[in-house]
Image: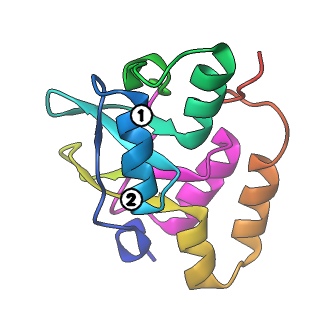
Amino acid sequence: MQVSDLMTRDVRIANAGETIQQAARLMASLDSGVLPVGDRGRLVGMVTDRDIAIRAVAEGRGPETKVRDVMSAELKYCFADQEIEEITDNMGDLQLRRLPVLDRDKKLVGIISLGDVAFEQGGGDGIGNALGAISTPGGQHSQSG
């Protein structure tokens, strides 16, 4: 099964220059905790509700803080034509629960989460292994340190 079979296709993008308040409102309206971030038509990062809480609010930054100041700029992604097993292994290694999905021209075409995969595959061994690796404290996206 390929990523394109399970990904969410209707993805909204936050602008790097907008405020975290605007991004948080968009997240609330979408009932989502993550947004890809774009700037001048390019995907430049990801921002999560946790980024806003830890990198902004906990640091005393206000609602006018720009998304670019709290987003994760080191962008990890997968391709729509990759196999699900391959990307769940990568998600575990990278300790990420969600990945933006690109086509081979590197255009954003969706987003995939472990939840998408678990829902479809019923939480098979690949999901359990990925979730176990993701849930291990630390990793490159740790908010502490």
The residue lying toward the viewer, choosing from 63 and 47, is 63
How crowded pointer 2 is (Cα within 10 Å; few <14, some 14-19, many 20+) is rated as few
* Image position of 116 with respect to 138: above or below: below
Q: Is residue 78 left or right of residue 110?
A: right
Q: Residue at x 60, y 63 (%)?
A: 114
For mark 1, give the secondary structure.
helix
Q: Is residue 60 left or right of residue 98?
A: right
For mark 2, give the secondary structure.
helix
The residue lying toward the viewer, choosing from 14 and 125, is 14
Which scheme is used to colour this image of the protein? rainbow
Q: Position of residue 107 (x, y in %)?
A: 20, 46
Magenta region, residue range: 74-99
> What residue is shown with label 2?
29
Q: Which mark is residue 21?
A: 1
Q: Amino acid at mark 2?
A: Ser
Q: Is residue 24 magenta?
A: no
Q: Position of residue 23 (x, y in %)?
A: 38, 39
Q: Residue at x 71, y 78 (%)?
A: 123
Q: Residue at x 14, y 27 (%)?
A: 40
Q: Is residue 2 visible?
A: no
How crowded pointer 1 is (Cα within 10 Å; few <14, some 14-19, many 20+) is rated as some
The residue lying toward the viewer, choosing from 34 and 131, is 34
* Image position of 27 with respect to 123: above or below: above
